Image (cartoon, grey):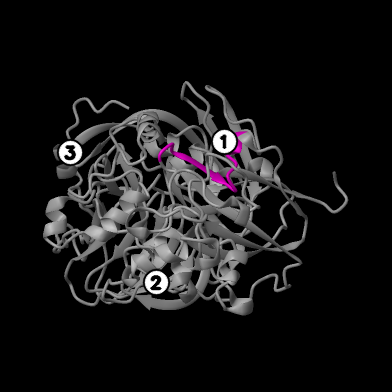
Amino acid sequence: MALSGITRRSVLRGAGLGAGAAAVPWLPAWAQPVSAGIVTPRPASLPTLAGPDIALRVAHQTMMIDGRTHHAIGINGTVPAPLIRLRQGQDVRIAVTNALAEETSIHWHGLLVPFQMDGVPGISFPGIAAGATFEYRFRVVQAGTYWYHSHSGLQEQMGHYGPVVIDPAGPDPIVADREHVILLSDHSALHPHAIFRKLKQQGGYFNYQKQTLAGLLAGRDQPAKDRASWGGMRMDPTDVSDVTGSTYTYLVNGHGPADNWTALFTPGERVRLRIVNASAMTNFNVRIPGLTLTIVQADGQNVRPVTVDEFQIAVAETYDVIVEPTAAIAHTLVAEAWDRSGMARATLAPRAGMTAAVPALRTRPLATMTDMGMGGMGDMAGMDHGAMAAMSAAPDACPPEHAAMGHCQLAGQTGAGGMPAMSHRMRDFANAPELPRTPVVQTISPMPVDRTGAPPQGLANAGHRVLVYRDLVALAVNPDVRAPSRTLRIHLTGNMERYMWAFDGVKLNAVTAPIPFRAGERVRVTLVNDTMMAHPIHLHGHFFELVTGHGDHAPRKHTVNVAPGGTATFDLTADAIGDWAFHCHMLYHMHAGMMQVVTVRPEGAA
């Protein structure tokens, strides 16, 4: 899409944004620089795409971020894509035309659709060839906040994503006077295949926040003893995110931090923010200094209202939040990258042109021994490394109960400073026979623990209320409250040096059979993160209930972020016949192999 004759300054001046102002051409109506949002009842002044017939065209285009032109892939000429607004119970037909010179697709993230309409090439349909049109047809069976994106190549990184809002068939239990869609993403001037090549060459290529001697002397970094220990494991505790602000600009609704996208409100209103993390590789820590955030929906499912000051939204998650600004002042919406290498920023204000203070980036987080899967040993930071060396010095130094669970090292394997050896050579697989001997298994968490009750990585000392998964309680009773009939344990594995990621040490291209389920069965699945990276795991075609102690009001989600060295458990009812993608939603983790297929078949089927 050419921008000849149009400068960003002239567009924004024209967009001044009174009635009849010129629109920024590369942005959809809902993401224009200043948005009044949707006021209840919704006026027709904010165009959206609605059923029963919708047409989408995927094509290359340009967009402008913080005054610079970038290449992108958009839908109907915009990045982000148009807002699709549907109603629960309706039938919809969505014709997607591919104007690219390569295959494309659209996956309806979180929507419960027939598997043939799920949009994953090679699993549920053949993809949309260059120049072809594919028609998605399905009945909308749910309500809430969702999104859509490409599942072909790495197109999602280039802007191929947009929001979906589904209104309930009856009254909405979430009462608001106005609503805004807040779509977070990360964008790089580097082509996504170039990013992936650099990661394959060096897993920490984009980590520009490594520990330094100056930082150590200033007391900002870990003590020398701990640094030596991490060095002995050939790992870096600053390596929290694979791709960082060294190449990414973090966006709100397609706008960079300097663009300052503005959402309008009237003081005294209940404002609903439908927040979507459509990024490729970035978890965001979201806060609005001066305002309390009331979480009312997670992954499109209503939850009992819970008030916090900050929450982390992992890649592919959605959260609906109520804020109630009472004064006629501006507020800054801060979406800080989880590794603190940059932020997305927007403004909530009663009128255009207002701004509020933008807080500085906080100190970067450092991975801890809990992040290495030693959470079951308590606070490792204060543990004498000599004592840890003694634990692994000889076979009889390992407590029998730990040896039985596979929590000890091979005799004599210790790293620098006496830390247990967790080198890139494989550890004691005799104690973990369920994992194959494979280059994709770099480490095994010695004592992984359920971390759903702990603040996300880097937020333990935030100094205010931070959302944890255990805060989420479903508003209604779960649709299936049966006890699981069987259990399944899946390890999330990887090799950072070789940039290889997998489930149970097996990359997608080496999988010989899908993960089988029988239709209607109830299964308890535990994910064990054996890596020092967080993994937002997404199951297509289903919702599952997180096992967090809330019984028949367990929160229902389609994506769960599994903390480094931690576990997460959910109960799944396999109620959708077909083949479904099951993967980490970190785009380059999935591309490097952390994906498998779940197949649901009727009882007695082959």
Q: Nearer the viewer, residue 40 or 139?
A: 139
Is 140 left, or right, of 57 in this rendering?
right
Mark toward the viewer: 1 or 3: 3
Label 2 CA crowd tier, 10 Å (few <14, some 14–19, many 20+):
many
Q: Is residue 40 visible?
A: no
Secondary structure category for the residue under label 1: strand
Mark 1 or mark 3: name the one nearer the start of the chain: 3
Q: From the image, which quarter does the C terminus lie in?
A: top right
**Residue type, numbered disc 1:** Ala
Residue 519 shown left or right of residue 214 in the figure: right
Q: Which residue is mark 3?
A: 67
Residue at 14%, 39% (x, y): give it.
9
Label 1 sits on residue: 95
Cα distance between the residues tagged 1 and 3: 33 Å
Whether residue 104 appears in this view of the structure is yes
Three-letter residue code for mark 2: Leu
Give residue 194's mark. Answer: none
Residues rendered magenta in the picture: 497-509
Residue 68 higher or lower than 315, as above or below? above
The residue at the point 48 percent across, 43 percent down is: 425
Which badge, 2 or 3, comes first in the chain's sequence? 3
Q: Amino acid at mark 3?
A: Gly
Helix, strand or loop at label 2? It is loop
Across and down, in percent, residue 588 comes to 44, 40
Q: Which mark is residue 467?
A: 2
Q: Is residue 559 above or below residue 326?
A: above
Asked whether the residues under the numbered discs 2 and 1 touch, taking CB atoms below 8 Å apart as contact, a structural biologist would say: no
Where is residue 581 drawn, in percent x and y? 61, 45
Q: Position of residue 355 (x, y in %)?
A: 14, 60
Disc 2 to disc 3, C-alpha distance:
35 Å
Residue nearest the viewer, comparing 516 with 36: 516
Q: Is residue 57 above or below residue 330?
A: above
